[in-house]
Image (spheres, helix red, strand yellow):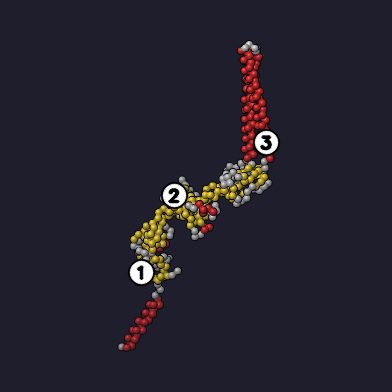
């Protein structure tokens, strides 16, 4: 009998050993403790946006010519109306001086002729008086009147010539001014194309040529970015936004949706999008930024503060999650009710409470309801 009992014990131990050796260890999962916080409904750009200036002019000369002087350098701050560069213009200066002299001559000539006309008018009046007293002949009086009338027309013609000379001077002033490139607004010189002695020409229609000067107004900056057409219907001007720049990782800038394009952009092999502009709320930010920085935006459509929330990555299809039961060490497949959600967080309105633990590592093979697991520390 003792031998039988001993044999049974040996068999039981062997079976238990085989079972333990063949048993898979519990899966290790990463857990997240449910807590309260803010959840926002947002719309994000589909492709990287760009920091742009509200005013940027690629300036070209209105007429061609040889560069005579460059009065600014790249990076200089300039005022509105300041001369940036000038072309060789001695010929136009000479034409302006000639036109000015002609105006002066026409003015003097008109003054001389008009003085003579005034004298002729007085003489005609005097002859009329003498004729009334029968002290002058009718022929002399008629001749005086004719001379006075002719001199009046001559005076008017001289005044017209003076106006023609003044207009000619104005034309030459404009032609001379075309040899100067002036800043249309205050800004920073971003780029200069051309050196003293080089020949520059205006950009012909339909042909893209480098500008003589690229001028940027840094007093106003914004981000332009594409939004999927599906989300465009929920947008309206004035919505708050967040701006993130690759150049300032980890830093977020407050902004406001300022413009929504009135049409959908349909580019080949790309999703249809709507361009939007988001302005920076803090004007001081422009001192740190450069036009052309890449940027991402999140436009905030709605906000729910102090709600139960979980990471969106923990939510499976049909709004299900795995809750960890620390007493049994097993998983519970749980359906939840959700509210607002974004890429980061999902609002939970029912079936989860702060303090509950849910599985984040959904990529672990074999997850199922009732599965025994072990929490993993990362």
Q: Is residue 35 above or below residue 146?
A: below
Residue 28 position within the rendered picture, expressed as x and y whole percent measured from the top left: 42, 70
Mark whose residue sits in front, 1 or 3? 3
Q: Would residue 155 be seen by someone viewing this image from the given angle?
A: yes
Q: Is residue 202 left or right of residue 262?
A: right
Marks 1 and 2, how far apart at CA: 46 Å
* SS type, badge 2: loop
Residue 93 position within the rendered picture, expressed as x and y whole percent measured from the top left: 67, 38
* SS type, badge 1: strand
* SS type, badge 3: helix
Marks 2 and 3, how far apart at CA: 56 Å
Residue that numbered label 3 is attached to? 97
Sequence order check, earlier mark of 1 and 3: 3
Q: Is residue 361 left or right of residue 141?
A: left
Residue 245 position within the rendered picture, expressed as x and y whole percent measured from the top left: 51, 56
Residue that numbered label 1 is attached to? 325
Residue that numbered label 2 is attached to? 238
Q: Few, some or many C-alpha atoms within 10 Å of disc 3 (few <14, some 14-19, many ≥20)?
A: some
């Amino acid at each position: 009998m003792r031998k039988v009992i001993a044999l049974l014990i040996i068999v039981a131990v062997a079976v238990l050993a085989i079972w333990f050796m063949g048993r898979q260890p519990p899966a290790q999962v990463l857990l997240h403790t449910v807590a309260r916080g803010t959840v926002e409904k947002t719309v994000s750009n589909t492709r990287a946006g760009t920091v742009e200036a509200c005013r940027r002019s690629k300036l070209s000369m209105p007429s061609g010519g040889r560069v005579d002087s460059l009065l600014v350098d790249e990076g200089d701050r300039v005022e509105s109306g300041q001369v940036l560069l000038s072309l060789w213009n001695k010929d136009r200066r000479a034409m302006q001086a000639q036109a000015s002299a002609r105006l002066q001559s026409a003015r003097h000539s008109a003054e001389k002729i008009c003085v003579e006309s005034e004298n002729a008018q007085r003489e005609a009046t005097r002859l009329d008086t003498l004729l009334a007293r029968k002290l002058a002949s009718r022929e002399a009086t008629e001749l005086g009147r004719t001379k006075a009338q002719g001199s009046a027309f001559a005076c008017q013609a001289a005044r017209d010539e003076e106006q023609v000379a003044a207009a000619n001077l104005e034309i030459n002033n404009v032609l001379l001014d075309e040899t100067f490139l002036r800043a249309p607004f205050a800004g920073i010189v971003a780029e200069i194309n051309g050196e003293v002695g080089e020949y520059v020409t205006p950009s012909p229609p339909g042909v893209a040529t480098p500008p003589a000067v690229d001028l940027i107004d840094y007093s106003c900056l914004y981000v332009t970015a594409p939004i999927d057409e599906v989300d465009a219907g929920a947008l309206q001007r004035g919505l708050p936004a967040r701006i993130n720049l690759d150049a300032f990782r980890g830093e977020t800038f407050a902004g406001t949706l300022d413009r929504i394009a009135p049409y959908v952009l349909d580019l080949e092999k790309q999703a249809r999008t709507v361009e939007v502009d988001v302005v920076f709320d803090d004007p001081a930010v422009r001192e740190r930024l450069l036009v052309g920085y890449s940027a991402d935006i999140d436009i905030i459509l709605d906000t729910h503060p102090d709600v139960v929330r979980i990471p969106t990555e923990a939510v499976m299809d049909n709004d299900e999650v795995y809750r960890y039961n620390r007493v049994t060490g097993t998983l519970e497949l749980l359906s939840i009710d959700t509210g607002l959600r974004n890429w980061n967080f999902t609002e939970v309105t029912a079936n989860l409470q702060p303090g509950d633990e849910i599985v984040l590592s959904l990529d672990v093979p074999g997850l199922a309801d009732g599965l025994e697991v072990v929490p993993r520390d990362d």
